[in-house]
Every structure is written in structure tokens, then in C-alpha cells.
Amino acid sequence: MSYTDYFLSDKQLLEVLAFSTDATAIHITEDAVIQYANDAMLAIWGKGRDVFGKTLENALPELKGQQFIDLFKQVWNEGLTIKGIETPADLIVDGELKTFYFNFEYRAIKNANNETYCILHMAKDVTDVILGRKREQDLIEELRTVNEELLSANEEIRAANEEIRAANEEMTAANAEISAANEEIRAANEEITASNEELSESRKQLMELYQDLAESDAYFRNMVKQAPVGICIIRAEDLFIQDVNTAYLELVGKPRHEIEGRTIWEAVPEAAETYAPIMNDVIITGEAFIAKEHELELIRNGIPENVFIDFVYEPMLNDNEVQAIMVLAIEVSDKVIARRSIEDVEERIRLAIEAAEIGTFDLNLVNGEMLTSERFDAIFGFDKHVDWTMYVNAVHPEDRAGREAAHKSALISGKLFYEARVIYADQSIHWIRVHGNVYYDKAGKPQRILGTLLDITQFKRLEQQKDDFISIASHELKTPITSLKASLQLLEKLKDNPTAPVVPRLIDQSLKSMRKISTLVEDLLNVSRSQQSHLKLNKTEFIMAELLNNCCSHVRVTGKYELILQGDLHLKVNADEHAIDQVVVNLVNNAVKYAPDSFVIAMKVEKKDDSVKVSVTDTGPGIDPEKIPFLFDRYYQAQSAGFNNSGLGLGLYISAEIIRKHGGQIGVDSTLDQGSTFWFTLPLNS
């Protein structure tokens, strides 16, 4: 349950206020209509609750002609607060008109538009105090009169003594008068003694109250000074600093003489712009302001520092009026910086994991529950988190024994590692690599495994391509080398007969084998250059159509294929002509390779925005969509049969690198049973 559940309703607040011993009433309109008065106020007026809703003049007609009705109108119309001290008022109480004395306050309560919407009327009956003071003054006056009479009596006594000396008869009469005067003096002395006792008792009570107040003030100030948090007491009316402890001085980084005897914003001017309006609002509303981890710049020991502070502006009330503001503050810079550092490290780790496309998991070995990241689920082929057993069942049946062995070994060694295949719902197979650390309890029993998961399908594919490449390269190099070796061996036997008819044919065969070897080695060198960014471009301006018309003589001479040139035959480009020729040859070779029965190959040049697009189109069987994403990978060879099915699987990869170096794009559009179009673009403004 929150604190707000205990908040009182308006009705409950008024019922509680009714028991207050401080007389309080609320009036509305300039006629001072009584909307509410508590029991203490009704007792002062000598009235019941039937006065609610009446004007003050109707409820208390005896006030007519006194100053109070006009004072209410002045407070309402001018939005003032008027106070009276020991003000007399004639009121009819218990049917009798009496004079009473009051300390009172008429306060205009305003809305946000500075308009008065009610008057708060507070009063305190000080009649007994005034009458007591008056009685004391009367006693003093009576004592003064008695003293004067005593002096007069003494004069008479002296006169009587003179008369005694003159005449014994008059002495008797004078003694009688003196005796009567002494009786009066004794009575006066008794009254004076009683008054002195009353004054002494009042003075004693005042001294006790003063002593209690002094002790309370000393206790409070000592508590402020010893508090472990910064405390500063600020007077509300002028923001003057009344008290400040050592912790607050250390917080703001200033000596005591620069703080005491000044207003708060004179002492800490760097915080005034932001926090002065907040403090003013606390003074006006009487509501505390609580700040958590506020960042501000303080001039501490003459040096600007950015710090983080938790603080409270707590209003100190007296008669519902803010008399002072208590500032409680504590620096939390170390906590904030430490938390932010942890958050920064966590964010960097998260970004690193996301960038590396690594899945993470937390396996509870006690209850079998496992927490996984979204990437972990995706690598296993799931679009949401599933039960641990479903992850286990996704592992390829042939790899489950290895996974189980790795887990058993990890419980002993503390390290988990294995590679396995997983089967997706579409029956596609993917490779994963699992790393993890085992964590144990104090008894050495394994409790959990924290680890990472990586999709290594592409790595395995490249590894397979590498193995395929080694096999293909060995085969491709072995054939021309074997042929070259045989030709050279025959030439060696015929060196004494250089005119033999077979010699020219052996030489041609040797040269053909060398060209084949040179082509294979050049492909490998181009791959190496592209990987090391050493593929240099020698750009010149040339007409693209002329390059297309002059290339691919090895295809034309067979007489089997017809190369057709289409499009803009005059479009010029600025590029490496030799490299682009190599690209076109590779694309034409690819058309022959994937469409051996497409005897017409179309080459087209066209302008597309700020680029030139060159395309090579065949009408063959098309390419399987599953193979298209890998056509431009290193060592990739699709199964085919046609004009030229040999090679290292590097032609399209090298072509893609050449086009990328030129700032262009390369791709293929293919539809099964309709043909394929290999294309590339080059920027015209290069």
C-alpha cells in the first residue's frame, strides 16, 4: 500500500481541522460570507454552525460600525494580508455584549491568476492576557496610590509629633489616625506581596520556557553539525543562511566564512540559475522538492567540478507558513560514475556480441532451465525461446553423441566446446560452435554453464570450398603440366632431329599447356592482389561497345556461338580497359558454361542514370535460385556441362572485385527455363 492510500478526503480534513485549538475560518466574497469555521472560532463568536453561508455582518451584527467588516473588504479587493495584535472587539456572547481582545490575521488566498478566491481568517483570544496585564497595572497604580498616601501619612505623623509636643490631647487623636493608617498600609502590603508572588511565578515559568527553548535549539544545532549529510538552514523571507554544517561546506567546496552571513545564492551563485526557481516554488507551495542524481557544476576550492548530488528542499512550517528551508544534500558522484561505467561496459559487451552475431545462453544445471538471447534462438532456427529439450533435439542425430560427450567433459574440466550440425524446421542443415564455462558452488558441484553460440555454416562452407579448390587446383594444374612434360620429353628425344614433322605440333602443345598454366597462376595472383588491396587500375577513356566487339575471340573462333552487340554503341567510359575486358570474358564464359545450348549470346550497353550498365544474356536453362547467392564467392563452381567447365571457380569472384574497385555493382538475374543475364555497372563520372 502506498502513502497516497492514507491521504484524507476534503471532508475528513475539515473534520480534523474542526478540533484545532487555533481558531480558523474561511470567508468568500468581499462581504466575508462564512464558508467554514472550526469549533474554536465558533466558540469565540458564541455561535453555532448555522452561521455557515451568512455574511460576517449578518452572523455577528454587533460588528457593524466596527473596523472588521471594512478590513475584510480591503483584503478581498486588494489581495492583502492584514494582521492585528491585541485588537479589541465587541461581541455578544451568551446574550451579553462584551469587549474581547484578539490577535488576528486576514489573509487573501489567490489562484494562479493572482485573483483572490477566499480569505483565511485566523484568530487567537488574548482577552485573559490583556485583562491580566490590566489587573497588574491596576495593582501597580493602587500601590503607587498607597505609597503616596503613606508619604502623606508620614507627613501627618511628623505634623502630629509636632502637635504632640505642643499638646498631649492632640497626640492621642494623632495616634488614633496613625493606627488607622497602619492598618491600611498592612492591607496594601498584603496586596503587594500577593502581586509580587504572581509576578515571580510568571517570571519563573517564562525562564523555564526559555531554558527549554534554548536546550531544544542547542540540541537541533548540534544534530545539524554532526549529521553525516550536508545540511543548510535558509531563512525563507530573504534566503539568508542561518546555519550550515561541515558536511555541507565540504560538499560545496567553500570555507565557512564564505557561506555564513550571506544569502544562499551569494554563497553558491553557480547553482542559482537552475535551483533558485525551485527553492522559490517550495517557499510558495510549502511542498518539498526531492532530487535524485542531479548533475551540476560547483566551484569547489576555486575549481569548477561537475558533480552528482541527491538533495531535498524541505520546508519548515510555522502556523502553516514556510519560515525556513532545510537543504539536505549528499554527493553521489562516485556511485553514478561507477554505475555508468558498468552500464558502458555492459553496452560495449552487448554491442560486441551483436556485432559478432554471437548467441548467448545461461544453462541452470540444477533445474534444467536455460535462458537464451534472441540470436541464440535464431541460430538454432527458432523465432522465440523454447524448452531446453527442443534445442537438444534440433542437433543432428549424428552429432548428439559428441555434444553429450562435450557436456560430460565440461563438468570435469570446467570448459565446454563442441561443433555440431542443427536441423531447421525446413530441414536445412547449419553448423554451430559452442563455447562455455562451468560454474560450481562451494562444494564443487556444477551449478550453471554460461556460454556463447556462433553460426559457422559459412565458415564450414568456405572450408569445404577450400578443400574443393585444392582438389580442383591440383587437377587443373596436373593436366597441363603432364601434357607439357610429355611434349618436352618427346622434344628432348628429337633434339637431334629438329626438322621432324611432329616438332611444330609438340611446340604448339607445349605453348598451349604453358598458357593454361599461366592463366591458372594469373587467377590465383589476382585473388591474392584483391585480398591485399594490391589490384591496381589503369584507367583510360574508351568506347564500351568497341571493347565488347573485340573481346571473346576464343568463343567466336569456334563458330558455335553468335555474339550480338546491342544498345548505345557510342557510350564512353573511364575505366581500366584490360580489367573490364577480363570481366566481360568471364561473363561470356559463364553464359557458355551455364547455357551450352544457347547459341546466341546478347551483349548490351545502356546508360542508367549516372552509370553505364553492361549485360550478357543467354537463353539457356537458367540457374538454380539457391546457387545465385554464391556465384561470386571464391572457389564456387556450379555443376554444369558445356564449353568450358574447367577452372578454379575464381572468374566471377575476380570480376566482382574488379567492378568493386571501379565503384560499380555486379549481379545476375536468372529464371529457370528462360535464361540468365549477368550484368555490371560502372560510374560515368569516374
Image: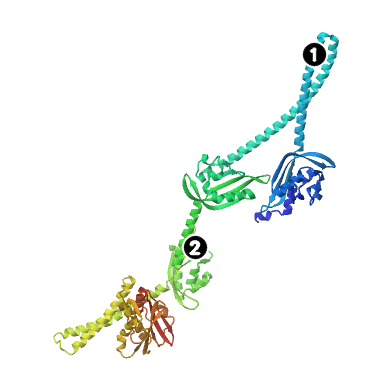
Distance between the alpha carbons at the discs numbered 2 and 1 = 121 Å
Task: Identify which amino acid the numbered label 1 is placed on.
Answer: Ala
> Which quadrant of the figure has residue 127?
top right
If the image is split into quadrants, where does the C terminus sit?
A: bottom left
* Neighbour tally class for label 2: few under 14, some 14-19, many 20 plus, Cα within 10 Å: many
Q: Which residue is mark 2?
A: 448
Residue 206 in the image: state x and y as whole percent: 69, 33
If the image is split into quadrants, where does the N terminus sit?
A: bottom right
Q: Which residue is mark 1?
A: 159
Q: In front: 669, or 219?
A: 669
Residue 468 in the image: state x and y as whole percent: 35, 78
Question: Up-down: is 174 above or below 438?
Answer: above
Q: In front: 339, or 47?
A: 47
- Left or right position of 568 against 394: left
Residue 116 in the image: state x and y as whole percent: 70, 51
As helix, strand or loop, the secondary structure at mark 2 comes to strand
Task: Identify which amino acid the numbered label 2 is placed on.
Answer: Arg
Q: In front: 33, or 80?
A: 80
Which of the two labelled residues, at mark 2 and mark 1, occupies the earlier sequence position?
A: 1
